[in-house]
Image (cartoon, helix red, strand yellow):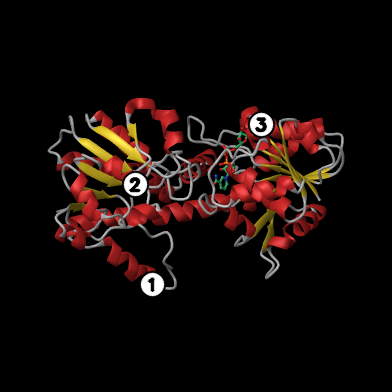
Amino acid sequence: MKICVIGTGYVGLVAGAGFADMGNDVVCCDVDAQKIDGLKRGVMPIYEPGLDKLVTLNVTEGRLTFTTDVPHGVAGAEVILLAVGTPPGPDGSADLSFILKAAEQVGAALTGWSVVVTKSTVPVGTGDKIEAIIKKVAKHEFAVTSNPEFLKEGDAVADFMKPDRVVVGTDDKRAVETLRALYAPFTRTTDRMLVMDRRSAELTKYAANSMLATRISFMNDLANLCELLGADIELVRRGMGSDARIGPKFLFAGPGFGGSCFPKDLRAAISTGREVGYKLEVLDAVVAVNERQKQRLGEKIITHFGGDLSGKRIAVWGLAFKPGTDDIREAPALVLIDRLLTAGAIVSASDPVAIEAVRKQLGDRIKYDESHYECAQGADALALLTEWNEFRRPSFERLKSIMRHPVLFDGRNVWNPAELRAAGFTYYGIGRGKDV
Ligand code: NAD
C-alpha cells in the first residue's frame, strides 16, 4: 500500500517507519526542510529507543522516503496520515491552524480515492472541518477518518508495533476496510481494531489522556496529604494498586506531569467542554493540582535553605519530561530550574539525551554536564527530576564525597529514604512521611 504521512515528528516518524516496516511504501513529508534534509542524510531529529534502526533499515530497503513536497508525497497514496502538531492556543483550546493547512494541501494534491486519517490529537468535530476543507479543493473522492495515536514517548516504537487497540472513527465502509488491511499485521494475535463514529474516536483520545493524568494528580494530591500525616505514599500506592479494579499503573507521585500531550490535551478537553457550555470539574482540578505540584519541589528546596538560595549550587539530574525521550515540552525540570534561578541559585544539570534541547531554551543560564557526577560536584543539594535508569542506583558514597552538602531531593521517589538517612544524607521525597 502507498502511504503518505504529513508531519514527521514523534508520531509521524514512528508511524511512517512502522508502516514501512510492514512492507508498505511510505513517504514522510514535513515543512521543516532542515529536518527532512537531516533524515535524508540519516540524522534522527528526535531521540526514541529503536527508532534510528527502524528508520535506517526501511530507508535502505527503499520503503521509506522523505520530502518537503506534499503533492509528491500524496500522489498515488491510498492512505494519507495527518500527524502535525496541535499545540495549545492562548486560551487553552487546540490550535488547529497546522492541521487545517495540511488538510488543504492534501486535498488539493489528491490523485485518486484516499482515506485521510487524522492521527493528530484533535477536538471533537475537527474531522468535520477537515472534510469540509478538503471537499472545497479536492478533485477526487475521499474519506476522513479519525485514528488517534496512543503511543507513549520513550517506548513509542514498541507501542506502535504492538498497540493495545486501534481506534478507527468513520462510517465509511471502504475506509474501514482499508485501515483494517493496513493494521492487520500489527494486530495478528487478536483483532484489536475498535470501529466507531468519528466524534467518539476523537473524544476517546482525550478521555484516555485525561484518565491517565487524573491518576497522577490524584496520587500527587494524596502525597501532599501523606507529608502532613506522616504516611508514605509509596506504601499507599502499593496497597491500593494491588486492587485488581484499580491496577498498579500510573500511580506514581512525582513533580507533576509534563510532556507534549497531557498538559495540552487536558486544557483542550476543558476548552471543548466550555465551548458547549459544560464545565469539566474533575479535569479543572487535575490541572490545578498539577500546576501546584510542579512548584512543590522548588518550594521544598527553598524552605530547606531558609528562603534564600543566593550562591547555593543546586544540581539537577534529569531534564526530559520522562525517561527514554529528549522531549522537554512542559517538563517539570524546567519549572524547577526557573524557580531555583529566580531564588538566586547556581544550577548545573545533567541528562543522558536532553541537554541540547534545554541548551537551546536556557542557553548559559545554567551549567550542563554530560557526567552526572560532575554535575553534583560541589553541590549544596541534588534534585532528581527524571528517573533514567542510571540515576536510580548511583554510588551514594561517591555522591557524598563530592557534594558540598549531602542533601537529596528525590522528585521521583526512586531512592530509599531510610538507607540514605542512615548514610548521612538529608532526604526529601514526594509524600514520604514528614520531611526530615
Ligand atoms: P511534533 O511537533 O513532534 O511533529 C509535528 C511535525 O509536523 C513537525 O515536524 C512540523 O514541522 C510538522 N508540520 C507542521 N505543519 C505541517 C504541514 N502543513 N505539512 C507538513 N508538516 C507539517 O508533534 P508530535 O509530538 O509528533 O505530535 C503530533 C500530533 O500527535 C499532536 O496532535 C499530538 O498531540 C499527537 N500525539 C503525540 C504523541 C506524542 O507522544 N508526541 C502521542 C500521541 C499523539
Q: Secondary structure at mark 2?
A: loop
Q: Position of residue 71 (x, y in %)?
A: 79, 32
Give the quadrant of the C terminus: bottom left
Image-based side of 203 in relation to 135, left or right:
left
Closer to the camera: disc 1 or disc 2? 2
Residue identified by numbered label 2 = 385
Residue type of the residue flagged with mark 3: Asp
Q: CA distance from mark 3 to mark 2?
A: 34 Å
Residue 108 seen by the camera: yes
Residue at x-position 77% and y-position 51%: 24
Residue identified by numbered label 3 = 37
Residue at x-position 30% and y-position 45%: 373
Mark 1, other Cα within 10 Å: few <14 / some 14–19 / many ≥20: few
Closer to the camera: disc 3 or disc 2? 3
Residue identified by numbered label 1 = 242
Question: Quick one: 28 or 235, which is closer to the camera?
Answer: 28
Q: CA distance from mark 1 to mark 2?
A: 26 Å
- Considering only order in the chain, which callout, 3 or 1, is on the residue closer to the N terminus? 3
Residue type of the residue flagged with mark 2: Leu
Image-based side of 385 in relation to 182, left or right:
left
Quadrant of the displayed image that contains ligand 1? top right
